[in-house]
Amino acid sequence: MRILRVASVPNNRTGGMSRVMHFTGDALRRLGHHVDYLFREDMGPAVRPRLERFVLPCRLPGLVRRKQAEAGPFDVVEIHEPLTAYYCFARRFDPNLPPPVAITYGIEARSRRAILAYKRAKELRVSLKQRYSPLSVVWQANYGLRRCTAVICFNEEDAAFLEKAGLPSGRVFCSHSGVSDAFLAAGSAATPVPGCHPGILFLGTWLERKGILDLVPAVRRVLLESPAARLTVAGCGCQESTVRQSFSTELQHRIEVLPRIDADHDLLQVFRRHSVFVLPSIFEGQPLSMLEAAALGLAIVTTDVCGMRDFILHGEDGLLVRPGDADGLAACLMRLVRDEAETRRLGQAARRKVQDFTWENAAVKMLAAYEAAAFPVRPFDSRNAPSIVGADR
């Protein structure tokens, strides 16, 4: 098959979404398929961030036409959920545009609702902008999800949500993130590193959606109660001072901040210096960092949502807490900091489970969606697409 993949993220192998695209693309090529890309750098002149959500979707049909003129026709075009709307609309008038497959790393409508629920539970102020501005993305995403010929999700909750909303099960496919051979090999060859316990690693952008409002008080309690404990915040995408100022002065020397990680080798070394991985996100599709931590045998503490719940079975290969439960998060971290044997048991169980989460397996599941879109049993009529009940509320 000839596959074009589109997302408005930078073209690199260090970001979350771009890494998933490149690694699954490499696997698809090994299976004999042609894979091409349109990343943010390929989408024309920069526009103001507030306008990108409108401008880039409108550019997309023309970009795909130009790409086909240069490289030849594609069987399908995979499009990140927020960009799908205008392409689906344009295709009603241009049959030469290849059938679209939406890919969602966490459905926009569900993400918005989860964030609002979190803010209400925390009694945080929600401005009119925070409440209504995301709807411009949600509405576009919903239009595209209803009208794409297939949808790829990264967790079972998203897939069930779409099927409950009326999308036929034959149009909804569930894949997953993966781990590279290098991570699997490093995990298999790993030996305990003297002094690594009890290092805690948070790998992700320093954002409210990643659960930092719960991470900070939970880690503060752990650091105060366990003098040997350390925290590393890696790939935070912000100034080191922004992270450090969240903690009191007497704790800051026990916190390491790595704003960027530029190479897989560096990332492997970061993981191997720690025994516990923490990611208290409010909402995720399925975080790649969680699977990579599992491959290296770290004990995982994360939230009981979406793709985390798909992978972690509480108490057997990791620990799950409710989103927003800072006390529960602190208790789980303290449990691991105080019990090296339990940390090692959970980490090794996660490492055994992640062996099946290869990029090849993820690519094969995506390929099923591409084939359903390119070679449908019955032609898909987008005019009869169901509405996604309740998604816009």
Image (cartoon, rainbow, N blue to C red):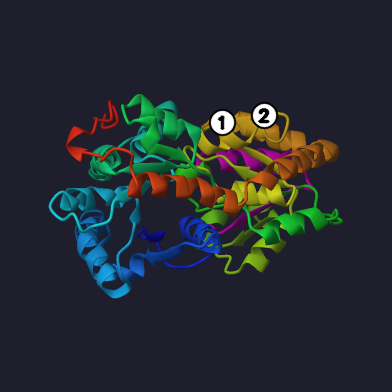
Which amino acid type corresponds to the residue marked 1 in the rendered image?
A: Asp
Residue occupied by mark 1: 304
Q: Is mark 1 on a helix, strand or loop?
A: loop
Which is more toward the observer, 364 or 193?
A: 364
Residue drawn where x is 45% and y is 43% of the image: 209
- Picture quadrant where residue 72 is located: bottom left
State yes or no: residue 170 in magenta.
Answer: no
Q: For the C terminus, which image quadrant?
A: top left
For the question of whether residue 329 can be seen, the reply is yes
Q: What element carries label 2?
A: loop
| Mark 2 closeness class: few <14, some 14–19, many ≥20 residues within 10 Å | some
Above/below status of 362 relative to 75: above
Which is more toward the observer, 215 or 361?
A: 361
Residue occupied by mark 2: 314
Segment colored magenta = 212-238
| Mark 1 closeness class: few <14, some 14–19, many ≥20 residues within 10 Å | many
Residue drawn where x is 47% and y is 58% of the image: 21
Which is more toward the observer, 111 or 72?
A: 72
State yes or no: residue 235 in magenta.
Answer: yes
Which is more toward the observer, 327 or 174?
A: 174
Q: Where is residue 241 in the image (x, y as percent from the top left)?
A: 53, 60
Q: Where is residue 77 in the image (x, y as percent from the top left)?
A: 33, 56
Who comes first in sequence, dot 1 or dot 2? 1
Q: Mark 1 near mark 2, Cβ–Cβ under 8 Å? A: yes
Above/below status of 113 relative to 79: above
Residue drawn where x is 25% and y is 40% of the image: 380
Q: Position of residue 45 (x, y in %)?
A: 25, 72
- Picture quadrant where residue 146 is located: top left
Which amino acid type corresponds to the residue marked 2 in the rendered image?
A: His
Circle number at residue 234? none
User: From the viewer's perspective, is 199 left or right of 327?
Assistant: right
